[in-house]
Amino acid sequence: MLTASGKVRGDQDMIFYNQPEGGDGAVRFSADGPGRFDVQLGRVPDSIEKIVFCATINEAVARNQTMAMLQDAHIAVAGDSPLRFSPALSGAREAAMVFGELYRRQGQWKFRAVGQGFNGGLAPLARSFGIDVAESAEPAPAPAPPSPTRVSLSKVTLEKHSPTVSLEKKGSSFGEITINLNWSRARGWFAGSAVDLDLGCLFELADGRKGVVQALGNVFGDFDYPPYIELSGDDRTGDVSDGETLRINGAHWHELKRVCVFANIYDGAPNWQKTDGVVLVTMPDQPPIEVRLSEGRNDQRLCGIVMLENDGGRLKATRLVEYVRDQEKLDQRFGWGLRWRAGTKD
């Protein structure tokens, strides 16, 4: 059970066979038959924003076992709209996997299929959620053959000294690519003053069409049709726990050439160093990519954050963290060539 930070509040938020209840009884685990969790959403503590469902193979290293050995592993959700998700496990070399997650959005609970594996089994999986797990004394497995395209599924943070990462598709597409912007209203701005920090992007399709997706002008895009990019909504205060999210339809990645993600201060006094802003790019079966807005020029209202490029079918992500006056200046910096005019969101 995770807070808005993506971490547990403490060890009590890990529910499993040795601790079958959590969240003051909101989540209960039963090991009878297939593993089952009963979740009473109305009782989930307000501080919990996400419930992540995972599977790990016990003593996987000692037994040299991976998720690829499972024939029909799946997660099923019962309720008014039953769901079932079976991740592609053929060839998987991980011993732990996030199958799916329940998460809050605008006061409602939703479910997302994930299928993200973790190298090393339970320990790195638990640590990614803020749980301290002691290493076991299992013997090391035989070395695997080298794989030049394999990326460890730990978080990738793009820094100045290491600004780029390139990811290969696993399967037919990247799946749903999400780009989330979260910031702290309380730490980022003068007390009592709201700020409207917007997430958006410039896009260029493979056929040469170009445009922008942003709340300004109500250009929210479309997930299933060109540009295959959609903005989830407009958080005008920073009070929404999920922040703002861009969704890219990875099934159409071949139709995209490049996407320049930016954050724009639509309203409020700029103070970039104190926003505690962080952008997280996630997709199934790939390492999350993190870019932090840890610096900035307070005389500029827009930050170009990360460039996503189609590099021969791969996804190449490059840290930008460049501060300019507005969208038009960002356009000029990277040669988009759009025509701009002043606009509002009202």
Image (tube, helix red, strand yellow):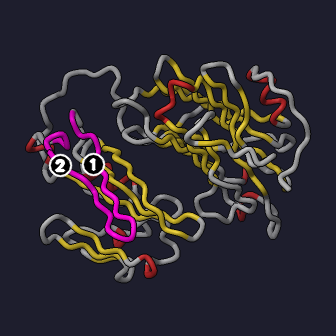
Residue 260 found in image quarter: top right
226 falls in the magenta region = no
Specify whether 124 is left or right of 331: left
* Rendered-image quadrant of the N terminus: bottom left
Specify whether 157 is left or right of 131: right
- Image spot of residue 12 (x, y percent): 34, 73
Task: Indicate whether 66 appears above or below 22.
Answer: above
Task: Indicate whether 68 appears above or below 309.
Answer: below
Do tag 1 and tag 2 residues touch (Cβ < 8 Å)? yes
Task: Indicate whether 246 appears above or below 305.
Answer: below
Identify the residue under disc 1: 86
Identify the residue under disc 2: 72
Foreground residue among 132 and 7? 7
Q: Residue at x 47, y 37 (%)?
A: 156
Residue 86 shows in this picture: yes
Q: How many marks?
A: 2
- Measure the alpha-carbon separation of dots 1 and 2: 7 Å
Q: Residue at x 73, y 31 (%)?
A: 211
